[in-house]
Amino acid sequence: MVREGLSQHGWSCVWANDISKDKFNTYNDNFGDEHFKLADIWDVASDSSIIPSSTFLYTASFPCTDLSVAGGRAGLAGVESGTIDALFKILEAKCRVGTKPNVVLLENVRGFLTSHGGEDVAETVKRFGDLGYFTDIIELDARDFSAQSRPRVFVVAVQESLAMQTMKLNKNDEVFDTWWSEINSNDYLRSHRVKSIISKNPSLKWGILELDFDVKNTIRLKDIVEKDLQDDSPLWWSDERKSHLFSQMNLNHIKDLELMQKGETYSYGTVFRRMRKGKSMAEMRTDGFAGCLRTPRGGSSKQILIQAGFGDWKVRLLTPREYARLQGVRESFILPENTNKGYFAMGDAVCVPVIEFIAKQILNPLFDNYKMSNKAMDFSDKAKTAGML
């Protein structure tokens, strides 16, 4: 999905990697396999020469497993989230031979900001600083671009020479100097969690990007659901399954559902099952947005759709294509034929319009500035290229 978003704004992918065969298959169906290396990232780190040296941008979405409560909050010391170390091993190798990328973009869940009290983020920024990068952290939620609530953290590390031209830099160890106070009122793109990490680590190489966030999203759940399903479609749940779901709702959600049924048009809500005090509960949201999509690791991880109106209600799982629409994916994007693999492909991905926003507001301006500052260079070797790790 990173490639899908960046390609809309002039970027070319020159290399990609994942350990998942299913992800490789989806990638291959849509883009071909020319640039895809199916391998463990640690194997890649052992021989980083296989990554093209002229790449301007590296992107990476390391596993969030150890950053979540469900994953035990091991943080970057965990086996899965700790694969960020492989990325730094690659960057260190590229630094030694003078071919490190100009920009690195990381993506992860908001739990990254609170992992080990913010120390994991601070350590990440320090490691970037040791390699000659200044770093900014922004937070974006897919609900500003699509009908899905999906808050994510993006770490943007910019090579020092480029950062000096494009960022407000913290160069005098005073966190509340003008570089920070000028944008301190922007609580939306950088929450108090980010500001707290910065204020506790003023000596790190922080750089602030000036962003224009003027997004007006009108897409809601009703806009992405399949509306041509017949009443006898096998996707709709049986009365027995429907009744069981109803029995798992609390009184407030039952009242919401009763109100929806009275409508003279169809309205929609989504449901996740969650464990509350040892009991499985069906929690419904009716604000026009789906909850954050997940990978299908059991029935409770799949998002349920409720359609209500005209005195009745029906229920089913969201389809993989509806998942794709919530991720802002074009209709022509080829999804796996297997339903669970379709859920996995979309549930373990980034929201495409969010990546497009980052391309327009951050990456393209960085590249344009780089190009203007190096007019005499031959850009045939270092065009708008990205490697996705």
Image (tube, rainbow, N blue to C red):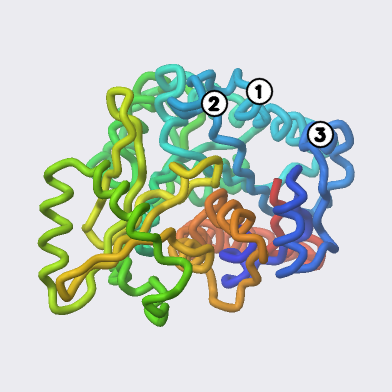
Q: Residue at x 86, y 31 (%)?
A: 46
**219, above or below 116, in the image:** below
Residue to which mark 1 is pinned: 79
Which secondary structure lies at badge 2?
A: helix
Is 59 left or right of 42, judged from the image as shown?
Answer: left
Asked which secondary structure carries label 3, the reply is: helix
- Disc 2 crowd rating (10 Å Cα; few below 14, some 14-19, many 20+) is many
Q: Against 72, is 60 above or below? A: below
Q: Position of residue 354 (x, y in %)?
A: 46, 59
Give the label, 3 or 2, closer to the camera. 2
Label drawn at residue 66: 2
Q: Residues within 10 Å of mark 1 (few under 14, many from 20)?
A: few
Task: Identify the residue position indicated by label 3 in the image.
Answer: 45
Regarding residue 368, the answer to whether it shows in the image is yes
Q: Secondary structure at mark 1?
A: loop
| Three-letter residue code for mark 2 | Asp
Counting from the top left corner in percent of width and height, residue 302 is at 46, 49
